[in-house]
Image (spheres, grey):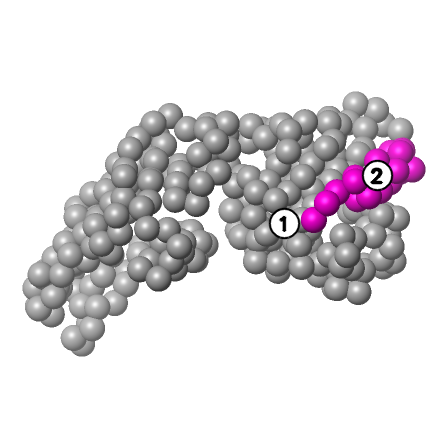
Amino acid sequence: METGSFSIATSVLYITRTPLSRVISDLERELKQRLFIRKNGTLIPTEFAQTIYRKVKSHYIFLHALEQEIGPTGKTKQLEIIFDEIYPESLKNLIISALNISGQKTNIMGRAVNSQIIEELCQTNNCIVISARHYFHRESLVCRTSVEGGVMLFIPKKFFLCGKPDINRLAGTPVLLHEGAKNFNLDTIYHFFEQTLGITNPAFSFDNVDLFSSLYRLQQGLAMLLIPVRVCRALGLSTEHALHIKGVALCTSLYYPTKKRETPDYRKAIKLIQQELQQSTF
């Protein structure tokens, strides 16, 4: 029994008629790996299944919040789902099956997706774009800088008081350092927080995190985020445009020269950032 597939295990546990068991059985056949085994009358996830869970946990948290929004008591009654054409077919079928089980009314279609399409489609609450590529959700965040080098600073709305950063609330707040910025000069970052936000010797904790996880923690108001401008550009997000992330109040840029070896012009950087702080509306 321990070497059997989920299909065999479910037949012993009398749950073969559930839609979920059929979906999991189909996944096992598609992945050619076992997801569960039966032990002492209980289904136990395999190491392979636990590995998958760790990778998709942050996505699950996001989808759970989305489920609350589109459920029977949520605001959204009719849901339009657009799958990127490169999205894996097996995962697409899994999501569609789950939606069918939930009874949610959906209009499902596939198309080539890019950042411009997402910006257009996400203006409505009833549209969801699912892609294997990373894109920002654009809402309630402004960026006005066009400098080539630097990092983008994202601050949650809850850290603002009367349109300005609340220093007392910012103190001790974790700063998520995007993995693309792990070699960035931390002295420059500390100088930035001291001169711009007025925090000396900030007790921030810098964590190297992936983009999806960092955006989730940012949107939940758990941390600030520093991400290199070049990473934004690589993701198709031009800093000349307005960038919008749900739950985020400010996006500004810390300038540093990328082609010269001289010391960064901190005074110019601070002046630019202070202007953005004064001009931003929240």
Label 2 residue SS:
helix
Residue 158 visible in the snapshot? yes
Tell me the quarter of the picture where residue 236 sits: top right
- For residue 249: magenta? no
Q: Name above or below for residue 205 compared with residue 30.
A: below
Label 1 residue SS:
strand
Tell me the quarter of the picture where residue 21 sits: bottom left
- Disc number placed over residue 248 in the picture, else none: 1
Q: Residue at x 75, y 42 (%)?
A: 280
In the rendering, at what x and y percent does residue 127 appear?
39, 41
Q: Is residue 277 shown left or right of residue 94?
A: right
The residue singled out by tag 2 in the image is 275
Residue that sits furthest to the top in the current view? 259
Which stretch appears magenta?
263-282
Viewer-closest of 222 and 138: 138
In the rendering, at what x and y percent does residue 217 appear?
57, 55
Q: Amino acid at mark 2?
A: Gln
Task: Give neighbour class at mark 2: few <14, some 14-19, many 20+ (Cα, 10 Å).
Answer: few
